[in-house]
Image: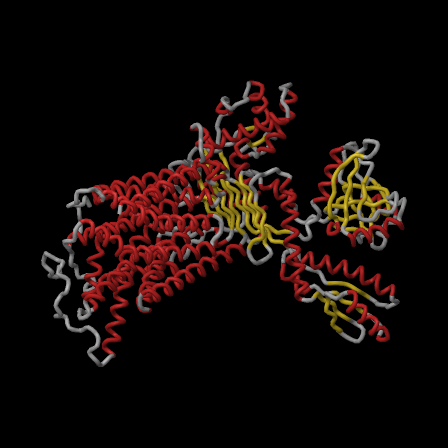
């Protein structure tokens, strides 16, 4: 099956509507960045503390937010982090003024959770959030008191097994001690001791990330530098393989993709983290791919048709590669959509950036990169007095490949 | 042509075998297969769970400590040469501003003009790493030479890395990383599988300082009781320190010790627990040669007195000096094996030469990691299935070539991750999925070209050849650009992002191999029969 046998769309003739659409999107994006939502920096770039907590029931977001706001200074954000494999999860974010408060902040957040949802004064150990060492230390006297014989080695192994079962089988959150009945080494005596010293709160802290504000600023600089260097590197490579104006056209197209994608992030108030920057850089590479394929074709066609005007050579190149462009973009888009739908919350920003970027990247190769080269050549042609450059539009076509009509499709 | 085809097939088969072995080893059972897979593919912290700490060494404290020691030495030297002075001191440093290290200076006031030459020659001979500037006719300022300052700061970081490594070793972790990081005296600590970063931070300590101090008086049950013994006033150059409680101790113990340590952790080289001739526990220790000399003269002059081992301003042990000790000695009279072992551990892990401040701390529970792997896996399968379906549908039988090339690509990618001990992170899994999409691009380029050549009327074999040849350069161009952007991502990114860059680059390089070499071989195989093939299913 073939979708695009011999097309002859006048892409470059119709460039203006698309250039205007690009400009509108860019302005909308920039407007949102500067005047509306601004840039939603994640803690990688802003510094702060983030805690991902899974609950045993749909989490009461407002309650969590007000409890946190009372105890912790600065902006507090509580968002749902639920996905297919991680139901009832929230992401709690707080600000961090300076590095020294790193630990205090985390302690404060944990305390709020324990006070609001746990049993802070029972004296019992929080089983869903404990570490192996604490479990061993609490169980040892209880087991000794219950006259359950156990060597230190066995106790260590038991603790490891209990926590492994909790984490692998129940994603870190158990609601009933009997869920641990099938752990190797378990017996009623141990079960009793366990119920004596531990309790089960309805939440489990699955991840804590804390970044000092200095680091945040550093990472921001690194991200910008990485993007600029990457664009620069590609400019050099393409200028080397083609003419410098092609390099410039390609880089402007990629830059345009990056700005629009960041603008869309701002419009939808999506968070920008280091992995999003990774996605953006991948996009830069990917958008280059598309552009290079078209430029390659243009170069090949130029070799065989010296008298044809540049615009029609470009048009032909785009038409010839149309099938490939649609297929590749389509297929890459399929994989990226799979990531977006099934990849979970952690990769959400990453896959969102790729989804936007692939759409924008594909059309920028045709409607931004090539027109720039075209504009430049037309401009330099006008300035040159002599008829060196291809001008006549009636030069005979040299490729007798097409069996069908060569009329431009309206 | 057949010979060429045979060689190519052999190369491909060997590659497949090498890769498969790289991923799953040579298993004898299904469980062993799973185990080998888990061992060979290293998972990053975000998939396995663990702790990630970045801390900054407060080098300015080490510089100040060095200045303090220099002041003591200077005072002795000046006394020996009968040079008088009114005051020698250094300026303070703030606890979390490393840039203060540049400003540490020793100020010497009140050197009489008659002694100037003697003073200057003393400094230039005995303190060559310092620069002396005259502030006035009798006052001077001493600062470390810039190159020596840099050396001291770097040495501080290196020693901190070693000390932290030693301390964490006691946790018995198999896969830990403690390395220098960044440009601002930072250290990165990665501890996979550690679910309790607090315990680690306690072990690392924030500002552990080891000293051996001269004991003047004690024990007393409280700080006030000690002060009371001396008329409520602290004698010159002393401080009151509490002792860490030991088993069997009745009440608190406080000691009066000298403020200027005899030996600091800097001079401690090694220590281990042992038993003496009466089977009683003791701790043996070794000092550096300079430390040994100083310790020798001190112990010789103080036989019968006591000294205290002080860690983080708490006394861990008090011992009586029985004879002159130079660079190796023992602390005897310890209560139990545990005490001897603990003491040797304190002595051996030395002191952190400066405090540390935590800049970044990430700890991920294993449950989240397992969820992430699961999600990544599902997305990968769905993506792969969609691509395979479309390729087969659109390019018919030739689509099979592409699918085979894709699968081989993924296998090579996983094998490379295993052989290079690269770390697979969650963005890395995303990178694998992205490679599938991008790898298919190369195949599409080639197939579209072949279709074009066929339409132009070329024979099947010629069309396939031309298709591959013409598309090859474009494939190289596109891959180079993505590799370039990944290179920058690798340079500037950290942790999970680095993992992503690595996986994508490996995937792209593998792709050039599979899309061009492998795919062409499959086509050649199809076309190599004795009958001339008229049409190609594409």
Identify the colour scheme used. secondary structure
In the image, residue A133 above or below residue A351: above
Q: Is residue A389 left or right of residue B252?
A: left
Q: Nearer the viewer, residue A209 or B421?
A: B421
Q: Residue at x 26, y 47 (%)?
A: B1
Q: Residue furthest front?
A: B3
| Residue B254: % across, % down | 81, 43
Q: Residue furthest bottom?
A: A385
Instruction: Using the rendered image of the protein, determine whether residue A33 is visible from the camera's viewpoint.
Output: yes
| Residue B136: % across, % down | 77, 75
Q: Is residue A183 left or right of residue A281?
A: right
Q: Quadrant of residue B478?
A: bottom left
Instruction: Using the rendered image of the protein, determine whether residue A410 is visible from the camera's viewpoint.
Output: no
Q: Is residue A259 left or right of residue B154?
A: left
| Residue B523: % across, % down | 25, 45
Q: Is residue A27 left or right of residue B397?
A: right
Q: Residue at x 63, y 51 (%)?
A: B356
Question: Looking at the figure, which quarter contains the N terminus of chain A?
Answer: top left
Q: Residue at x 63, y 20 (%)?
A: A149
In the image, residue B408 above or below residue A57: below
| Residue B44: % across, % down | 48, 43
In the image, residue B103 above or below residue A109: below
The mark total stands at: 0
Question: Looking at the figure, which quarter contains the C terminus of chain A?
Answer: bottom left
């Amino acid at each position: 099956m073939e979708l695009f046998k011999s097309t002859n769309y006048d892409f470059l003739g119709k460039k203006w509507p698309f250039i205007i659409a690009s400009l509108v999107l860019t302005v909308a994006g920039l407007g949102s960045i500067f005047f509306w939502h601004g840039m939603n920096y994640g803690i990688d770039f802003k510094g702060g503390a983030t805690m991902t907590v899974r609950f045993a029931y749909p989490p009461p977001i407002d309650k969590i937010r007000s409890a946190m706001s009372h105890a912790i200074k600065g902006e507090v954000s509580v968002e749902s982090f639920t996905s297919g494999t991680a139901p009832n999860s929230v992401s709690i974010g707080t600000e961090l003024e300076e590095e020294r408060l790193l630990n205090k902040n985390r302690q404060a957040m944990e305390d709020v959770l324990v006070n609001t949802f746990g049993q802070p004064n029972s004296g019992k150990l929080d089983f869903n959030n404990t570490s192996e060492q604490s479990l061993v230390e609490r169980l040892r006297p209880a087991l000794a008191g219950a006259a359950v014989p156990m060597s230190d080695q066995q106790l260590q192994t038991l603790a490891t097994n209990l926590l492994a079962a909790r984490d692998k089988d129940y994603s870190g959150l158990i609601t009933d001690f009997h869920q641990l009945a099938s752990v190797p080494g378990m017996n009623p005596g141990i079960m009793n001791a366990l119920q004596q010293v531990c309790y089960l709160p309805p939440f489990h802290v699955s991840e804590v990330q804390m970044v000092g504000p200095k680091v945040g600023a550093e990472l921001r600089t690194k991200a910008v530098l990485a993007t600029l260097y990457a664009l620069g590197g590609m400019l050099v490579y393409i200028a080397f393989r083609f003419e410098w104006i092609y390099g410039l056209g390609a880089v402007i197209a990629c830059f345009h993709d990056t700005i629009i994608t960041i603008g869309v992030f701002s419009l939808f108030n999506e968070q920008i983290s280091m992995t999003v920057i990774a996605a953006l850089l991948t996009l830069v590479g990917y958008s280059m791919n598309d552009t290079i394929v078209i430029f390659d074709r243009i170069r090949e066609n130029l070799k065989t048709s010296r008298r044809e005007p540049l615009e029609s050579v470009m048009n032909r190149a785009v038409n010839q590669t149309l099938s490939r462009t649609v297929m590749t973009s389509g297929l890459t888009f399929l994989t990226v959509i799979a990531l977006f739908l099934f990849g979970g919350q952690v990769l959400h920003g990453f896959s969102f950036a790729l989804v936007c970027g692939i759409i924008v990247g594909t059309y920028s190769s045709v409607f931004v990169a090539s027109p720039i080269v075209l504009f430049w050549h037309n401009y330099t042609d006008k300035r040159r007095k002599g008829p060196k450059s291809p001008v006549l539009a009636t030069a005979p076509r040299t490729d007798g490949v097409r069996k069908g009509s060569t009329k431009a499709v309206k | 042509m057949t010979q060429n085809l045979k060689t190519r097939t052999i190369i491909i088969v060997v590659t497949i075998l090498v890769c498969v072995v790289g991923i799953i080893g040579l298993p004898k059972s299904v469980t062993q297969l799973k185990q080998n897979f888990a061992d060979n593919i290293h998972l990053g912290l975000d998939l396995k769970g663990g702790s990630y700490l970045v801390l900054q060494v407060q080098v300015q404290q080490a510089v100040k400590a060095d200045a303090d020691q220099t002041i003591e030495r200077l005072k002795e030297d000046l006394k020996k040469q009968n040079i008088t002075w009114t005051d020698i001191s250094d300026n303070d440093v703030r606890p979390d501003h490393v840039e203060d290290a540049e400003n540490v200076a020793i100020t010497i006031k009140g050197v009489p003009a008659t002694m100037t030459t003697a003073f200057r020659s003393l400094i230039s001979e005995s303190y060559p790493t310092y620069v002396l500037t005259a502030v006035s006719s009798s006052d001077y300022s001493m600062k470390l030479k810039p190159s020596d300052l840099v050396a001291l700061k770097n040495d501080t970081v290196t020693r901190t890395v070693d000390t932290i490594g030693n301390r964490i070793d006691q946790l018995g972790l198999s896969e830990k990383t403690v390395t220098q990081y960044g440009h601002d005296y930072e250290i990165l600590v990665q501890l996979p599988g550690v679910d309790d970063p607090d315990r680690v931070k306690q072990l690392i300590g924030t500002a552990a300082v080891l000293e051996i101090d001269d004991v003047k008086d004690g024990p007393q049950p409280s700080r006030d009781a000690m002060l009371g013994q001396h008329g409520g006033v602290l004698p010159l150059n002393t401080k009151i320190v509490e002792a860490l409680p030991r088993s069997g101790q009745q009440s608190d113990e406080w000691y009066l010790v000298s403020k200027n340590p005899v030996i600091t952790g800097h001079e401690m080289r090694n220590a281990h627990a042992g038993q003496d001739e009466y089977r009683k526990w003791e701790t043996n220790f070794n000092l550096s040669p300079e430390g040994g000399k100083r310790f020798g003269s001190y112990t010789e002059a103080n036989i019968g007195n006591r000294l205290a081992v002080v860690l983080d301003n708490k006394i861990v042990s008090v011992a009586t000096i029985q004879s002159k000790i130079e660079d190796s000695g023992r602390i005897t009279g310890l209560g139990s094996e545990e005490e001897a072992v603990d003491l040797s551990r304190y002595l051996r892990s030395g002191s952190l030469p400066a405090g540390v401040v935590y800049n970044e701390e990430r700890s991920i529970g294993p449950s989240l990691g397992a969820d992430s792997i699961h999600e990544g896996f599902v997305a990968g399968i769905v993506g792969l299935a969609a691509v395979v379906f479309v390729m087969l549908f659109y390019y018919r039988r030739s689509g099979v070539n592409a699918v085979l090339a894709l699968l081989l690509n993924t296998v090579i990618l996983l094998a490379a991750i295993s052989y290079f001990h690269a770390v697979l992170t969650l963005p890395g899994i995303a990178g694998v999925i992205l490679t599938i999409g991008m790898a298919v691009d190369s195949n599409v380029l080639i197939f579209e070209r072949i279709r074009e050549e066929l339409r132009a009327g070329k024979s099947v074999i010629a069309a396939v050849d031309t298709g591959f040849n013409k598309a090859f350069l474009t494939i190289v161009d596109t891959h180079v650009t993505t590799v370039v952007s990944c290179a920058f991502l690798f340079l500037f990114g950290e942790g999970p992002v680095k993992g992503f860059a690595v996986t994508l680059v490996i995937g792209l390089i593998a792709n050039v191999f599979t899309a061009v070499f492998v795919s062409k071989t499959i086509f050649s195989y199809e076309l190599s029969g004795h009958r001339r093939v008229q049409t190609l299913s594409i």
